[in-house]
């Protein structure tokens, strides 16, 4: 029997088997091919989805909107300030209301417990568009990008995450690597190492799939021979402003530079979930440059703009992969 995840929520990758993740990736490639060829795929006409955001977004919101519209669905977007949720209505009640009107609910917020509560009460699939703990839809786009650059042969490749290895993206990357047989290396200061919860969950999965998980403070050890070097912002949404100073001091040695890329394999690629602080052309980038005297944060502008950087393919792939998640769970 083929793989089916129809009717399920997509809350974190630990809930999905290797086969189910591979199925979503194959489906994503099909949708990308169809989109490129101009083949219509309005398979979910008559359905409606709602996108609930407690934090800001460019990629995730647009990926859900365009993905849903391409599938023929209606879409409602609720921004961080414009629903009753949290202020006048509990998450549980919100879930029960939205579940009566919509066929699927996307949620970006703070606690993973909130998206789990929505899923427990909505009666329709709920998709996690980022929480403090996890960013599962991002991972499908990242792996699709890795597949495209390595001829769909990803088992045994080594993915290095540099920087704040305890954040939602780094934690999710460890899970997807373990599930798909890619070696995962977390490289950052001791204070930014991933928590025991995710390491303990991933270690047996990696062993089963013949790959390794390494935590290191050594940039040289991490980057030498890497296939993929990945980074993310040093301070994530929802963290207090006060953490900037210490993070910058601790994470500067873990900035992705051309020297890092030189240590990696000649065919190695650079990935970033975006948005990225690679210059001072943003309000926060300019503010931090003024305060701390740094003009680039987690990645140099040189690496970001280099041929090895696949960040805009990765961003496009958010849409194809999110479309696959909506289709597979709603069909
Ligand atoms: N990568 C990502 O989730 O981007 P947005 O915050 O713009 O959605
Ligand atoms: N770690 C980042 C990811 C943004 C897509 C954050 O949570 O802000």
Image (cartoon, grey):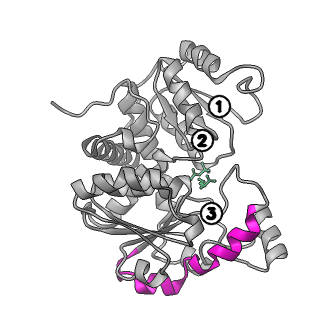
Residue 233 is marked as: 3
State whether label 2 is within 8 Å of ligand 1. yes
Instruction: Give the crowd class for mark 3: few <14, some 14-19, many >=20 residues within 10 Å.
Output: many
> Label 3's element?
loop
Which residue appears at 47% of the width and 45% of the height? 137
Task: Magenta stretch: give its range.
Answer: 243-268
Q: Residue at point 58% right, 15% down?
A: 96
Q: Indicate the quadrant containing the C terminus: top left, top right, bottom left or bottom right.
A: top left
Label 3 beta carbon less than 8 Å to ligand 2: yes
Alpha carbon separation for disc pair 3 and 1: 25 Å
**In front of the other: 325 or 135:** 135
Measured from the top left, where is residue 296 in percent x and y?
68, 76
Decide whether residue 249 is among the magenta residues: yes
- Tell me the residue that label 2 is attached to: 61
Question: From this viewpoint, which residue is outermost toward the top?
Answer: 100
Q: Is residue 288 visible?
A: yes
Choose mark 3 or mark 1, whichever is in front.
3
Q: Which residue is drawn at 32% across and 30% down?
A: 5
* Mark 1 residue crowding within 10 angstroms, few (<14) / some (14–19) / many (20+): some
**Circle number at residue 77:** 1
Mark 1 and mark 2 in contact? Answer it, CB < 8 Å: yes
Q: In which quarter of the image is residue 214?
A: bottom left
Query: In the rendered view of the protein, which quadrant contains the N terminus?
Result: top left
């Amino acid at each position: 029997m083929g793989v089916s995840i129809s009717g399920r929520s997509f809350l974190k990758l630990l809930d999905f088997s290797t086969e189910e993740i591979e199925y979503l990736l194959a489906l994503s490639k099909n949708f990308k091919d169809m989109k490129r060829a101009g083949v219509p795929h309005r398979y979910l006409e008559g359905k409606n989805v709602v996108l609930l955001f407690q934090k800001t977004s460019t990629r995730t919101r647009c990926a859900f909107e365009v993905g849903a519209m391409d599938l023929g669905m209606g879409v409602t977007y609720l921004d961080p300030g414009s629903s009753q949720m949290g202020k006048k209505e509990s998450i549980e009640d919100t879930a029960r209301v939205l579940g009566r009107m919509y066929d699927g609910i996307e949620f970006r917020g703070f606690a993973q417990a909130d998206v789990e509560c929505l899923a427990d009460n909505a009666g329709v699939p709920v998709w996690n568009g980022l929480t403090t703990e996890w960013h599962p839809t991002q991972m499908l786009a990242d792996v699709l990008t890795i597949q495209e650059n390595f001829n769909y042969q990803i088992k045994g490749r080594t993915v290095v995450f540099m920087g704040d290895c305890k954040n939602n993206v780094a934690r999710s990357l460890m899970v997807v690597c373990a599930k798909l047989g890619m070696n995962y290396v977390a490289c950052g200061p001791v204070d930014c190492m991933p928590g025991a919860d995710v390491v303990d969950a991933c270690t047996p999965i990696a062993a089963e799939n013949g790959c390794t998980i390494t935590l290191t403070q050594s940039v040289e050890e991490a980057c030498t021979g890497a296939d993929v070097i990945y980074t993310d912002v040093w301070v994530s949404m929802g963290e207090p402003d006060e953490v900037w100073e210490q993070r910058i001091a601790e994470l500067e040695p873990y900035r992705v530079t051309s020297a890092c890329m030189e240590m990696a394999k000649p065919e190695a690629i650079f990935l970033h979930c975006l948005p990225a602080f690679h210059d001072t052309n943003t309000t926060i980038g300019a503010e931090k440059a003024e305060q701390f005297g740094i003009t680039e944060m987690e990645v140099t502008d040189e690496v970001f703009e280099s041929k090895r950087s696949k960040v805009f393919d990765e961003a496009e792939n958010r849409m194809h992969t999110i479309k696959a998640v909506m289709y597979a769970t709603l069909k």
